[in-house]
Image (tube, grey):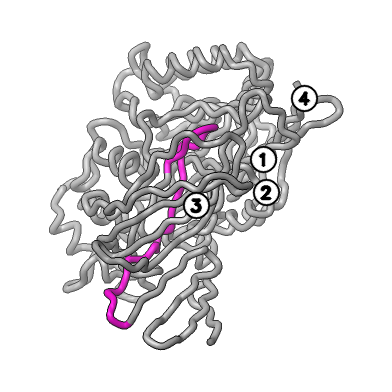
């Protein structure tokens, strides 16, 4: 028996007669095979949960041909931003491929690849504190959906940690080849008072701008915060950035497969309740809107890849989330229902869409939660850069709807906005209003930028052009539940705090 360290994961290798067992201890990944078995399938991308509430959740997984991404293999041919823009306009998959992929190479052999594999999966889940174990039937992953499979779980208990185990085997095989374990927590009922609630919000990642070999270090910092759940506001990956510029569906899937194989992120997603939002770069390209095409992929297909293939799926891509008596959140959708950015501003121009906006105004007005938080993929207050920005509600190009939303939110003194998208951390409070907005900043310092740190505006309560994340807490005190917004750096050090008592 020997213990080795490989690609950031402790692996215990035990040799017995005819059997090799590999235990991926750090991530709850496990695989075994006899000498006569086919190799795989594995859980190189682990699993994710999504859309969790009091009584339901969605579980997503993907089967892979290897337990980790390919650490070797050829690298993509570097091309300039200008060359990429010219290629995107051609819509020619052959040109897009030959400009970036070395001659004779295939995508599955490229450095960072984590190719999919056919196989069958089965899910087991149970309350951690005791209770009935439920097991699904074996099901085949879908090669038309990048070898993924999803389960819609219902009739769950509220305020409960569920332990998850997913098994994998070759099609028709009797022996289980791999398994992955993790957990998630359901939301407390609306009449339950929580002594403390903590959740983190992040934005703007990108594989190429990670700050550790194994992923983004903010995930290690968030582990120490003992969070109840996590929200990613979008730009989880960037199709329109190099290595490669993902202008075909296969390249888009490659980028997701590589990102989800990062052990730091993979381990975090498997052990926390997660909510994934999208923005422009992980839909198609910068400031994407209906009618756009990037290379061979159009806007509608970009929505489908995110909503139906690479992430847990739901009928609606916006959600109201009640977390106990004192906290309610509104997770907004910023791409599916929007107008074209180039349309003239006016009553018909929208980011939210009529249905989502009516839902937001109606349900927020009816909420009896002490604190209400609207989570938007892009700014509602800003300030944003004045030049070249036409994509969010803080921009003049969407002034009509932006003014409408701000006027509505200003009616309440217990509503706060949290946003991603911008590559700097900020707190905005519009003077003589009830309007507050908290910007998470990018997921790494290398990703920060886009704003002059000396350009502090009157509405800025805080400005920091560095990476990090936002931690939000609701803490029961003798004076009542207290709401805290804590902006932290990538190592989890507190940089700014705002405290509210309503």
Are the two marked residues, 1 and 2, in contact with CB atoms closer than 8 angstroms? yes
Q: Looking at this view, is 144 or 123 the one in front?
A: 123
Earlier residue among tags 4 and 2: 2
| Quadrant housing residue 470 | top right
Asked if 183 appears above or below 102 in the picture, the reply is: above
The CA distance from mark 1 to mark 3 is 22 Å
The tag earlier along the polypeptide, 1 or 2, is 1
* Spot occupied by residue 349 in the image (x, y as percentages of width and height): 34, 18
Q: CA distance from mark 3 to mark 4?
A: 37 Å
Q: Which mark is residue 164?
A: 3
Q: Secondary structure at mark 2?
A: loop
Report the magenta stretch's main SS: loop
The magenta stretch is 35-58
Describe residue 40's horizontal placement relative to residue 154 as left or right.
left
The quadrant the C terminus occupies is top right
**Of helix, strand and loop, which one carries label 3?**
strand
The answer to whether mark 3 and mark 4 are in CB contact below 8 A is no
Residue at the (63%, 25%) spot, across then down: 436
Q: Give the residue at x 82% y 31%.
A: 477
Q: Residues within 10 Å of mark 2 (few under 14, many from 20)?
A: few
Q: Nearer the viewer, residue 45 or 373?
A: 45
Q: Is residue 342 visible?
A: yes
Residue 389 belongs to the span the image colors magenta: no
Closer mark to the observer between disc 3 and disc 4: 3
Residue ID for mark 4 = 501
Helix, strand or loop at disc 1? Answer: strand
Q: Earlier in the sequence, mark 2 or mark 3?
A: 3
Q: Which residue is identified by label 2?
A: 226
Of callouts 1 and 3, the N-terminal one: 3
Residue drawn at 29 percent across, 51 percent down? 139
Q: CA distance from mark 4 to mark 2?
A: 22 Å
Q: Which residue is mark 1?
A: 198
């Amino acid at each position: 028996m020997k213990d080795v360290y490989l690609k950031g994961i402790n692996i215990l290798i035990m040799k017995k007669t005819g059997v090799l067992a590999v235990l991926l201890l750090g991530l709850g990944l496990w695989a075994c095979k006899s000498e006569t078995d086919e190799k795989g399938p594995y859980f190189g991308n682990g699993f994710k949960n999504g859309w969790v509430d009091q009584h339901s959740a969605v579980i997503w997984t993907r089967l892979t041909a290897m337990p980790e991404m390919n650490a070797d293999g050829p690298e993509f041919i570097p091309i300039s931003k200008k060359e990429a823009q010219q290629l995107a306009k051609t819509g020619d998959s052959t040109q897009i491929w030959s400009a970036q992929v070395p001659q004779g190479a295939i995508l599955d052999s490229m450095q960072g690849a984590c190719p999919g594999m056919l196989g069958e999966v089965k899910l087991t889940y149970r309350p951690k504190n005791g209770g009935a174990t439920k097991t699904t039937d074996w099901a085949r992953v879908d090669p038309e959906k990048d070898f993924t499979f999803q389960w819609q779980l219902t009739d769950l208990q509220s305020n409960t940690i569920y332990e998850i185990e997913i098994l994998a085997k070759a099609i028709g095989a009797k022996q289980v080849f791999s398994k992955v374990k993790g957990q998630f927590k359901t939301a407390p009922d609306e009449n339950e008072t929580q002594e403390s609630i903590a959740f983190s919000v992040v934005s703007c990642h990108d594989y190429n701008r990670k700050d550790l070999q194994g992923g983004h270090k903010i995930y290690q910092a968030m582990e120490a915060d003992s969070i109840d759940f996590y929200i990613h506001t979008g730009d989880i990956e960037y199709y329109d950035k190099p290595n490669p510029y993902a202008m075909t569906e296969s390249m888009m899937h490659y980028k997701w497969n590589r990102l989800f194989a990062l052990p730091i992120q993979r381990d975090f997603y498997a052990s926390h309740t997660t909510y994934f939002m999208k923005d422009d770069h992980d839909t198609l390209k910068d400031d994407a809107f209906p009618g756009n095409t990037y290379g061979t992929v159009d806007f509608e297909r970009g929505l489908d890849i995110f909503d139906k293939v690479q992430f847990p799926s739901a009928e609606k891509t916006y959600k109201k989330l009640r977390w106990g008596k004192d906290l309610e959140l509104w997770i907004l959708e910023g791409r599916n229902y929007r107008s074209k950015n180039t349309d003239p501003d006016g009553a018909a121009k929208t980011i939210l869409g009529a249905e989502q906006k009516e839902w937001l105004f109606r349900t927020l007005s009816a909420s009896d939660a002490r604190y209400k938080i609207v989570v938007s993929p892009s700014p509602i207050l800003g300030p944003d850069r004045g030049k070249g920005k036409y994509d969010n509600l803080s921009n003049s190009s969407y002034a009509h709807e932006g003014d409408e939303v701000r006027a509505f939110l200003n009616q309440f003194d217990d509503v706060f906005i949290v946003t991603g998208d911008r590559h700097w951390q900020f707190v905005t409070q519009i003077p003589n209003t009830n309007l507050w907005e908290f910007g998470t900043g990018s997921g790494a310092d290398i990703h920060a930028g886009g704003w002059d740190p000396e350009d502090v505006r009157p509405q800025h309560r805080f400005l920091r052009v560095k990476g990090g994340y936002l931690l939000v807490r609701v803490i029961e005190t003798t004076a009542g539940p207290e709401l805290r917004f804590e902006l932290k750096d990538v190592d989890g050090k507190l940089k700014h705090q705002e405290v509210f008592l309503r």
